[in-house]
Image (cartoon, helix red, strand yellow):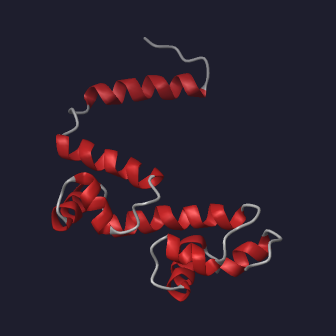
Amino acid sequence: MYEADDGDDELAISEAFLVALLPPPSAARERVRDLMQRIAFDRSIVRVEDAAAASGLDVRALQRCFQTYVGVGPKWVIRRYRLLEAAEQLAAKGPPTLAALAVSLGHADQAHFGRDFKRAIGQTPRAFMQTRGLAPR
């Protein structure tokens, strides 16, 4: 029987037990996992077509894989990561202008960016910056 000294040990023991019960991941599942990690860190991926090119899949195959293994489409995942990135940039000292940020994250214009940002973060970009004592540019 295993004995745990603290919460981290309990978690490690539980994880080791459960992992042993799982079937090995399929190649498709590993491909989607790897692509999710790449989307999280590769800021050049701003469109589904970018993710498809990075994965070697066509857009429709990529969408099916994401629906199967992630439960949402690649567009949702990409948008989510880029909006969290936008929040980080807006909270930093010397944030970019809202228009420049919108374009760099693949939005057609600042208005679309603002609506998406509010849906994901809960505040408009301007309100987000003002609550952090920063003046929007």
Residue located 19% across and 46% down the image: 28
Q: Quadrant of residue 78?
A: bottom left
Question: Is residue 132 left or right of 16 when viewed as pictured?
Answer: right
Viewport quadrant of the N terminus: top left
Residue 55 point in image, percent of width and height? 25, 53
Question: For the image shown, how many numbered marks are present on the structure?
Answer: 0
Question: Is residue 9 left or right of 25 when viewed as pictured?
Answer: right
Residue located 45% across and 83% down the image: 108
Res 55 seen here: yes
| Of residues 23 and 26, the one drawn nearer to the viewer in this rendering | 26
| Of residues 116 and 67, the one drawn nearer to the viewer in this rendering | 116
Question: Is residue 79 left or right of 66 when viewed as pictured?
Answer: right
Task: Name the residue furthest top.
Answer: 1
Residue located 25% across and 62% down the image: 67
| Of residues 80 and 69, the one drawn nearer to the viewer in this rendering | 80
Residue 112 point in image, percent of width and height? 50, 85
Residue 65 point in image, percent of width and height? 21, 57
Residue 43, above or below 4: below
Residue located 46% across and 13% down the image: 2
Residue 63 point in image, percent of width and height? 23, 65
